[in-house]
Amino acid sequence: MQTLVNYSGEDDFCSGGSLYANPMDSSLFLSLGPRADVYCPPRKRSRISVPFVFRGNMFEQSKPSSIEVLPNECLFEIFKRLPGGQERSACACVSKHWLILLSSIRQAEICNSKTTQYLKPEGGLVSYKADEYSKLDKEGLLKVSNDNEMISGDEDQEVEIDGYLTRCLEGKKATDIRLASIAVGTGSRGGLGKLLIRGSKSTRGVTNFGLSAIARGCPSLRVLSLCNLSSIGDEGLYEIATGCHKLEKLDLCQCPLISDKGLLAIAENCPNLTTLTIESCSSIGDASLQAIGKCCRNLQSISIKDCPLVGDEGVASLLSSASYVLSKVKFQDLNITDVSLAVIGHYGKAVTNLVLIGLQNVSEKGFWVMGKAHGLQKLKSFTITSCQGVTDVGLEAMGKGCPNLQQLSLRKCPFLSDDGLVAFALTAGSLASLQLEECNTITQSGVLGALSNCGAKLKALVLVKCMGIKDTVFGLPLLSPCKSLRSLSICNCPGFGSAGLAMVSKLCPQLQHVDLSGLHGITDAGFLPLLERCEAGLVKVNLSGCMNLTDVVVLTMAKLHGRTLQLLNLDGCTKITDASLVAVADNCMLLRDLDVSNCAISDFGIAALSCAKQLDLQILSLSGCSKVSDKSMPFLGKLGQNLLGLNIQHCNSISSCMVENLMGRLWSCDILS
């Protein structure tokens, strides 16, 4: 026995030695997170687990590993002949060296003729090759493993639809090693279809090597999004282009090393590209856009923001080449001029959604020519923000040149006046939604004139922070009603008060959705006429911040519109008391969302709500209601049986122990405390 214990001769129990040349070299060990894609099968404990000879406090390896003597060329040939994805993943877990070698193998180079047998629900076997996995879910088959165990398609993690898997790496988790493990681990599981990488300025993060591993191991990649990656350049994007020919969507944001060269490779090798987004890429210019327009005939959406090298030449070539398929266009903070707008107006035959933001070099002439070109016949949605070239003349021309325009959004257009808005309303016969934000030269006269002349299709009007809208006193004999308007939103327009609201109520008798948040000048006298003239019945009402409204408004609303009202927001209406909650409990049978935050309600109002037999609230917000105390806990418990969300933040009269008790009782309700 003593001889056996002290044995350390040449004829060791386990021939060979350690798998590693230097067991203390930690770089050989691969440490992956819990969500790593490599597959590591369970292993039985080895009978002889110590490949070292111990001598005092020192230890040394008895023999060098024979497998490590092999050159990379031999390991490459071995790895590409491994029978399946689990085996490749297991090898990738051995060391970073092996992982890097495995990630350098392209999917086309893997020698895999393996077929898998599946059991049909009605009986019988059918065989599929690795590229036929997508049929599994459609036919409802069961996989038969080597041990004749049946595994359902839902439980078999090795079988997925081609290009189905999605991976997202952010911050410090975005490294080359993780990308290499994803490339190896997802190859046999249906292939990676979507990859999003969000880098961090504090770390070096992903480089061209990691992107090259994805290109070699994930040929089914269809969506690639790269954001804030200063270490990725044209080399990595070139590898993606040559390895991922199925790429359909490319998103590049804050990638300064990617230039026209990398995007040219995408254009030449990815003909299926349909969506391209470029943001804050200082090295991308006109040459790559010209190539995209010529080679990517399926391009449907283009978005370019803050790229100083992009000019009229690139935009013109792109629009003219993809004129019959390009439907969504967004240009923001670019150095383009009126020439680009003229090209859009002439060649934008398929454009349905157009967004122009921060184009400082575009003048009134550009918008006028774009409308006069009559090429935007299919345009349905048009958004203009911070473009000083928008004037009355250009807007009127757009109304005439875009007969199918349904949505118009104007933000921060300082040179647009009432005359242009009314002229546009007269010509845009298909307009269904109009939004004006921070257009301070528009007055109440222009808004009412647009409502009266917009035709019979306008359904939504939104006014946000328009400081020029103020109450004026004049008659309305020449204004015809807008019976089509269903939604009215006037938010944070301090000059809009009761007089203007009374005029709107006369023009719009079919309102269903009303948002008057932030209008401090609205009083009961101005809001009551609107309640009385709404013939269709109000469905959603937001009065948050209307501090001058009282219980009279809620009582009238509950009486006249209680059978249709589904949402009521009274946040910040400090004059609303328990009387409003009693009226709501008695009349509003369909109410699902109620917000009485920062109101003067108490425990009595909560009790009234809980006693309502037909009320079926799902969302209730009591934030900042200081009069609601522990006495309301039984009533909230009763209400909470049907609630999905309850907000009791800043209710200082409710103790923490009562809150914990309520959370224990209402386990199916989201409670904010």
Image (cartoon, rainbow, N blue to C red):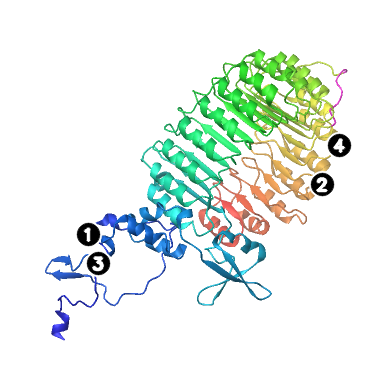
Identity, as a three-letter code, of the amino acid under mark 3: Ser
Q: CA distance from mark 2 to mark 4?
A: 13 Å
The range drawn in magenta is 477-483
Label whose residue precedes the other's in the sequence (1 or 2):
1
At label 3, counting other C-alpha atoms closer than 10 Å, the crowd grade (few under 14, some 14-19, many 20 or more) is many
Q: CA distance from mark 1 to mark 4?
A: 82 Å
Identity, as a three-letter code, of the amino acid under mark 4: Glu
Q: Main secondary structure of the magenta part?
A: loop
Where is residue 25? Give x, y as percent.
24, 57
Q: Residue at x 52, y 59 (%)?
A: 189
Identity, as a three-letter code, of the amino acid under mark 1: Met
What residue did someone put label 4 on? 535
Judge from the rendering whether residue 432 lies leftward or rightward of residue 225; answer left or right: right
Where is residue 88? Give x, y as percent.
42, 61
Q: Which of the labelled discs sits on residue 24, or is there none?
A: 1
Of circles 3 and 4, the one toward us is 3
Judge whether 256 appears above or below 96 on screen: above
Label whose residue precedes the other's in the sequence (1 or 4):
1
Q: Which of the labelled discs sits on residue 563, or is there none?
A: 2
Label whose residue precedes the other's in the sequence (1 or 3):
3
Of circles 1 and 3, the one toward us is 3
Of circles 1 and 4, the one toward us is 1
Secondary structure type for disc 4: loop
Q: Is residue 118 visible?
A: yes
Q: Residue at x 65, y 16 (%)?
A: 366
Q: Is residue 306 visible?
A: no
At label 4, counting other C-alpha atoms closer than 10 Å, the crowd grade (few under 14, some 14-19, many 20 or more) is some
